Image (spheres, rainbow, N blue to C red):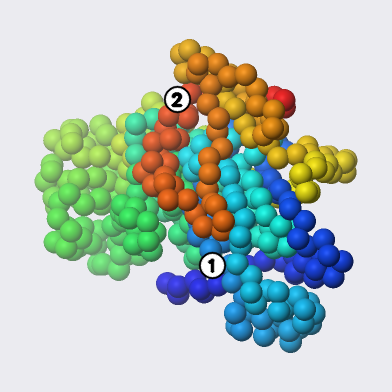
């Protein structure tokens, strides 16, 4: 994999720099501003969102620099004037950022990510911030629905061939954060220490003169604890051949096509009859959270999920926006129809029952916090101060645990896969 460029400054839109140039020209670039990232609504059919990508955003902001490699093409294309180019040459983000920690749940209006800085410093980050958060939150939100549907049975992310090569890595991270057990992507394994899994594809089976030859070659290389792909030709004969080659100690079989529920039932009966009672059944092939939920009663031990997780299971963006809400301490409000925003810098308090079930999310001005009960908790945390990430950011494992706790806190209706209201109501104080 080609390493990403050192600078992230060109991962932005043209109009971010023309806004900057205009603000520098009229003197408004230094006004203290607050920008908030939030979703006006969740993608259709979703009852909660999952925050993911925060660590990647903070790291990308620290690399948001304009060197000659970035400035020269901007100058050649005439994107901005020389005064703006000189300003960009010295740019280093100098502001503060608060937000929801990774693995936290969010709802409509939640202030997921809040940037406080002079206008010029904050506005140029819009595209970078949204491109990361919208992708990673969409993947994590879809993956969390899948892990919830799967219960205790593990899921393997295997969607790298269905998305951009760099997006595949971040998607694997977001899916792992949301509870997936492993990924097929080796770069994600290397970069984020995510367990990787994989055996063979149908091409390997068809390479050999017979299915038995393919199985014997795989077992000779990987041992009997491997997973044999039994559906290349005929599943029934494939299982017979697999157990004949390995004996009853075969680790697992994989079914990648057909009515996997029916086939898994038949395979379990056949494996048990052959004495392979401990051989696991792994299914894959166009699975999403609805298909996984439909397999709850079937003898499936693990799921391989590809396209649906890396594309956010039909919701490829989290609907997050980056909006100016305060200038020089004064709230500003956008009133465009269907695109309204609420002015002023905000925080959020989540209220819980004594039992730990979430009741509501109170989004309030930071200057007017609501009364808190013994089980309430403020959600945003410090993420960056003076342009530098804080020292105690959660690890990826911390974020996985946070999401597990968050999902348990939802009312049972909030975990339904059907359309409905957000799991936790947002109240604006």
Choose between 132 and 385: the one closer to the eye.
Answer: 385
* Rendered-image quadrant of the C terminus: top right
Choose between 42 and 345: the one closer to the eye.
Answer: 345
Q: Which mark is residue 408?
A: 2
Choose between 403 and 367: the one closer to the eye.
Answer: 367
Residue 120 in sight in this render: yes
Residue at 66 percent of width and 81 percent of height: 71
Left/right placement of residue 76 relative to residue 337 reads: left
| Snapshot quadrant of residue 77 | bottom right
Residue at 50 percent of width and 18 percent of height: 375
Q: Earlier in the sequence, mark 1 or mark 2?
A: 1
Left/right placement of residue 123 relative to residue 411 reads: right
Residue 307 in sight in this render: no
Q: Around disc 1, counting alpha carbons within 10 Å, would you say few (fewer than 14), some (14 to 19), or many (20 or more)?
A: some
Question: Height in image: 157 above or below 20?
Answer: above
Residue 141: where, in percent of width, then height? 54, 40
- What element does badge 1 sit on? loop
The residue tagged 1 is 63
Choose between 259 and 331: the one closer to the eye.
Answer: 331
Q: Around disc 2, counting alpha carbons within 10 Å, would you say few (fewer than 14), some (14 to 19), or many (20 or more)?
A: some
Camera-near label (1 vs 2) is 1
Q: Do tag 1 and tag 2 residues touch (Cβ < 8 Å)?
A: no
Question: Height in image: 396 above or below 44?
Answer: below
Residue at 58 percent of width and 45 percent of height: 98
Left/right placement of residue 412 relative to residue 124 reads: left
* Rendered-image quadrant of the N terminus: bottom left
Residue 10: where, in percent of width, then height? 64, 71
| Snapshot quadrant of residue 358 | top right
- What element does badge 2 sit on? helix
Residue 285: where, in percent of width, then height? 44, 48
| Snapshot quadrant of residue 181 | top left
Question: Height in image: 155 above or below 75?
Answer: above
């Amino acid at each position: 994999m080609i390493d990403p460029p050192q600078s992230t400054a060109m991962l932005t839109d043209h109009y971010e720099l023309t806004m900057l140039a205009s603000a520098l020209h009229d003197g408004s670039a230094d006004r203290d501003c607050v920008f908030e990232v939030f979703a006006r609504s969740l993608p259709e059919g979703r009852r909660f969102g999952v925050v993911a990508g925060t660590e990647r955003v903070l790291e990308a902001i620290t690399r948001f620099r304009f060197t000659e490699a970035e400035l020269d093409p901007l100058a050649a294309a005439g994107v901005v004037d020389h005064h703006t180019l000189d300003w960009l040459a010295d740019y280093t983000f100098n502001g503060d950022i608060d937000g929801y920690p990774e693995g936290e749940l969010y709802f409509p209006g939640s202030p997921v990510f809040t940037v406080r800085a002079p206008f010029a410093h904050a506005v140029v980050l819009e595209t970078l911030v949204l491109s990361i958060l919208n992708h990673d939150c969409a993947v994590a939100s879809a993956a969390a629905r899948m892990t919830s549907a799967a219960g205790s049975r593990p899921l393997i992310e295997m969607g790298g061939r269905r998305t951009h090569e760099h997006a595949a890595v971040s998607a694997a991270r977001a899916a792992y954060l949301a509870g997936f057990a492993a990924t097929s992507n080796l770069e994600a394994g290397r970069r984020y220490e995510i367990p990787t899994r994989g055996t063979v594809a149908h091409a390997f089976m068809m390479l050999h003169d017979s299915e038995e030859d393919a199985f014997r070659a795989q077992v000779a290389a990987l041992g009997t604890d491997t997973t044999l792909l039994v559906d290349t030709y005929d599943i029934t004969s494939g299982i017979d051949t697999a157990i004949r080659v390995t004996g009853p100690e075969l680790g697992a079989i994989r079914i990648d096509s057909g009515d996997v529920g029916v086939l898994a039932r038949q395979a379990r009966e056949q494996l048990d009859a052959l004495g392979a009672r401990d051989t696991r059944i792994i299914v894959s092939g166009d699975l999403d959270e609805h298909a996984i939920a439909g397999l709850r009663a079937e003898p499936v031990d693990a799921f391989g999920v590809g396209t649906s997780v890396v594309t956010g299971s039909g919701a490829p963006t989290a609907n997050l926006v980056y909006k100016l809400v305060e200038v020089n301490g004064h709230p500003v409000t956008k009133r465009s129809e269907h695109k309204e925003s609420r002015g002023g810098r905000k925080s959020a308090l989540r209220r819980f029952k004594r039992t730990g079930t979430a009741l509501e999310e109170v989004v309030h001005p930071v200057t007017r916090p609501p009364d808190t009960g013994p089980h309430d908790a403020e959600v945003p945390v410090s993420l960056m101060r003076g342009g530098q990430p804080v020292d105690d950011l959660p690890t990826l494992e911390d974020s996985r645990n946070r999401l597990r706790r968050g999902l348990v806190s939802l009312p049972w209706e909030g975990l339904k896969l059907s359309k409905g209201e957000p799991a936790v109501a947002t109240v604006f104080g």
